[in-house]
Image: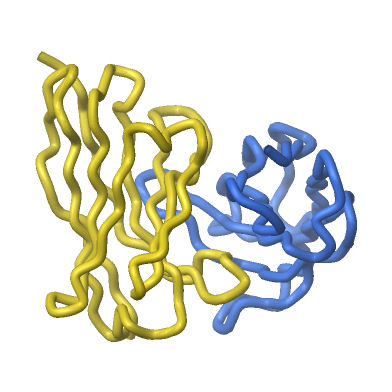
Chain colours: A yellow, B blue
Amino acid sequence: QVQLQESGPGLVKPSGTLSLTCGVSGALISSSNWWSWVRQSPGTGLEWIGEIYHSGLTNYNPSLQSRVIISVDKSQNQFSLRLTSVTAADTAVYYCARAPPLYYFDYWGQGRLVTVSS
Amino acid sequence: DIQMTQSPSSLSASVGDSITITCRASQSIRTHLHWYQQKPGQAPKLLIYAASTLQRGVSSKFSGSGSGTDFTLTITSLQPEDFATYYCQQTSSSPRTFGQGTKVEIK
């Protein structure tokens, strides 16, 4: 059974850096899947942040590209998100998800609420 | 970016009803269209991928159709556990974009 679990601080100060890690179990991060981050602001819809392949190849949402870095750690079977210069607008539930070659998300983490506040 | 527009934004239905949700893309996405169900406090759950393929383990009461720019999700015989918000998503091109969601409520 594939499982993903987000971890990281739930509170980040404005202008700081949001850092989350997604641990993967039941599947190898080096498999033929992309590994993604999606966020959902309270009461609003879903926004794709970006994705990474085990080779390190990444794709980012242009709306966030200047502030986002997604990285992968094959030895720990996990991948990570860094979002810099955060503001209150970055307050959201952050999900990690697995994307097979057609890029839909078949497995999701439970989500991590990150609040940007001083 | 490809814009995804769902209609309606919300609907009320009774247990046992069948409903259809529509998703329209701002340009052709072939069949790179997927449907998710989300309940409060939970992550989205994949229902349908590639426009019409039922995800393993998902009830056959859910069905999808369409190609190009117009797609539908149909749910038959609504049960209490089906009342949720439904999202479409395109993965034809980056950035992957979602519709705004359709909230299905009990009448």
Please name whichever residue, B63 or A117, is drawn nearer the observer in this view of the structure.
A117
Question: Would residue B94 be found to the left or right of residue A72 on screen?
Answer: right
Q: Residue furthest top?
A: A118
> Can you say whether B69 is above or below A1 in the image?
above
| Residue at 12% from the left image edge and 48% from the top image edge | A8
Pick the quarter of the image with the N terminus of chain A: bottom left
Picture quadrant where residue B66 is located: bottom right
Question: Would residue B73 be found to the left or right of residue B100 on screen?
Answer: right
| Residue at 40% from the left image edge and 31% from the top image edge | A41
Whether residue B77 is visible here, answered yes or no, is no
Task: Give percent across and percent down for residue B93.
Answer: 67, 54
> Can you say whether B10 is above or below B44 in the image?
above
| Residue at 20% from the left image edge and 23% from the top image edge | A116
Pick the quarter of the image with the C terminus of chain A: top left
Please name whichever residue, A1 or B13, is drawn nearer the observer in this view of the structure.
A1
Whether residue A80 is visible here, answered yes or no, is yes
> Can you say whether B4 is above or below B83 in the image?
above
Task: Give percent across and percent down for residue B17.
Answer: 79, 55
| Residue at 69% from the left image edge and 33% from the top image edge | B10
Task: Give percent across and percent down for residue A9.
Answer: 10, 41
Question: Would residue B52 be found to the left or right of residue B103 on screen?
Answer: right
- Total numbered labels: 0
> Can you say whether A20 is above or below B65 in the image?
above
Task: Give percent across and percent down for residue A80.
Answer: 23, 56
